Image (spheres, rainbow, N blue to C red):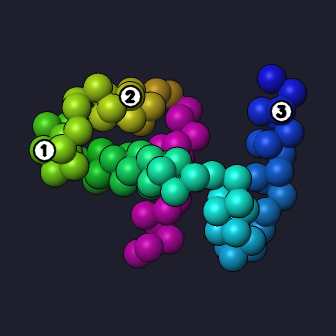
Amino acid sequence: MKSRHELEKVFTRIQDHKEMIAFFEEILTPKEISDLKLRWELLKELHEGHTQRSIAAKYKISLCKITRGSKILKKPNSVTKRLLDSYYKEKK
C-alpha cells in the first residue's frame, strides 16, 4: 500500500506535460498506456451521453468494461466526473 501512496504523490508533483509523457513511457508498457487511453476514451464517451452498447460496438469490447466507468460517473462526488466536467468546460 505504501508504494501506491508514493506513486500517487509522484503523479501530483508532475506539472509538465512532457515530463508526464516521459514518466508514463518509462514506467508503463505500451499495452498499459493503451489500456489507460481506452479507459479514458470510454469515460469521455459515457460522459458525453453515448450508450454503453454503442461504445461496446465501437471499440469491440464487452459491456463489463464500460459498466465500471458508468458506475464511476454515477457515484456521488466522483472525482472522475468532476475532472471530465472540468475538461469539457476548458475545451469550450
Q: Whole-percent x and y of residue 73?
A: 41, 36
| Dot 3 and dot 2 residues touching (CB under 8 Å) | no
Q: Whole-percent x and y of residue 48?
A: 28, 53
Mark nearer the N terminus (2 vs 1) = 1
Disc nearest the viewer among 3 and 2: 3
**Image point (53%, 35%), residue name:** 78
Disc 2 residue type (three-letter): Arg
Mark nearer the N terminus (1 vs 3) = 3
> Disc 3 designates what residue?
3
- Asked whether, in this view, residue 2 is left or right of residue 28, the answer is right
Q: Whole-percent x and y of residue 16?
A: 75, 73
- Give 90 or 16, whichever is nearer the viewer: 16
Distance from Cα at disc 1 to Cα at disc 3: 37 Å
Disc 3 residue type (three-letter): Ser
**Image point (79%, 43%), residue name:** 7
**Image point (22%, 30%), residue name:** 63
Disc 1 residue type (three-letter): Ala
Q: Magenta stretch: residue 34 in it?
A: no
- Asked whether, in this view, residue 21 is left or right of residue 49, the answer is right
| Dot 2 and dot 1 residues touching (CB under 8 Å) | no
State the mark number for residue 57: 1
- Asked whether, in this view, residue 86 is left or right of residue 66, the answer is right
* Vertical placement of residue 40 versus 4, above or below: below
